[in-house]
Amino acid sequence: DTKRMIACALNPRDPAIVSVTKEGAFRPHEFLSSNIRDVEERDYGFYVSCRDSKTVLRGIPIIWSARYLGEWLNHHPYRDNPDAPLWISLSRKNFGKRLKVASLNCVVQRLAKRAGIKKRVYPYLFRHSGATDMVINNIHLVIMSKICGWSPTSTMPARYVHLAGVDVEDAVLKAHGVSIKPKKRMMEPKVCPRCKEENGPEKIHCGKCGTNLDKPTHAYDEISEQEAKKEKMKADYEKLYEKIKKDIMRDLGLQPPK
């Protein structure tokens, strides 16, 4: 559903809203509290701070959704103003003003409707989904509590462990050093097999070279092999051409023989 909503977005803000809310497991009001100054670029993506209260900041690493956040920052009309809200209204009436929770809910519902999702979708659902993903991806419960803004004594992490149906067998095998096949993450970027560009998981074609990203990789291995043969033939032809050219020039006395 997340990928479908991102694919249906009509502006660069909305994919960032969906992906960042989910990855960071933000509460809606915390999510909307961030300003431009609260976004720090890191080697892995971004580090986004939100406000637990008027004085307490909580930082969250943003990795897989960094491409969407970066795209939004590139288009943000007030990106050079550190005090500007990160998430603003794009409507004519309220353009540039900080989004409110009710408006965020409308944005999410419009995306869901456009994506053909029948079930009820709301901003808090992304927090639940993000927290569940953390459990599935073996994020330590203490770290999970810090990311989600829960107290050290909260029982919420245990609830998500139960809801996510964590595989006990995998956990025991890992504890004993037995290798297990890693599960594929739903929101992994699609790496183009031709140009190696990273694309969003919802993309069908590479944004750089246009390659079909859903085509089996082995098909492009064959194409790459054919292209390599063509390049070699071209290089061999050019060498032969230069040799013949030199021979003719030598025979005509235009170049001294070597």
Image (spheres, helix red, strand yellow):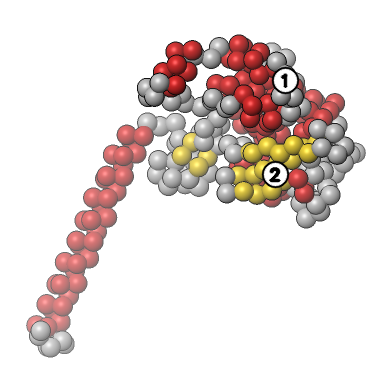
Q: Residue 17: give its label.
A: none
Pointer 2 local density, CA inside 10 Å: few below 14, some 14–19, many at least 20: many
Tell me residue 140's x, y (percent). Answer: 58, 26
- Residue appearing at x 74%, y 22% in the figure: 124
Q: Pick the residue in front: 228 or 178.
A: 178
Q: Mark 2 or 1 closer to N-term?
A: 2
- Residue appearing at x 48%, y 45% in the figure: 197
Q: Quadrant of the C terminus?
A: bottom left
Q: Is residue 255 left or right of residue 77?
A: left
Q: Pick the residue in front: 145 or 244.
A: 145
Pointer 1 local density, CA inside 10 Å: few below 14, some 14–19, many at least 20: few
Tell me residue 207's x, y (percent). Answer: 53, 44
Q: Is residue 173 visible?
A: yes
Q: Is residue 91 visible?
A: no
- Residue appearing at x 40%, y 44% in the figure: 194
Secondary structure at badge 2 equals helix
Place residue 24 in its image quadrant. top right
Q: Residue 72: give its label.
A: 2
Q: Quadrant of the N terminus?
A: top right
Report which residue position mark 1 lands on: 153
Q: Amino acid at mark 2?
A: Trp
Q: Amino acid at mark 1?
A: Thr
Q: Is residue 203 left or right of residue 51?
A: left
CB of mark 2 within 8 Å of CB of mark 1?
no
Q: Pick the residue in front: 238 or 87.
A: 87
Give the vertical position of 190 relative to 183 (above or below): below
Residue at mark 2 to residue at mark 1: CA–CA distance:
36 Å
Tell me residue 225's x, y (percent). Answer: 27, 44
Place residue 103 in its image quadrant. top right
Give the vertical position of 107 relative to 98 (above or below): above
Tell me residue 255's x, y (percent). Answer: 15, 86
Q: Is residue 50 left or right of residue 6?
A: right
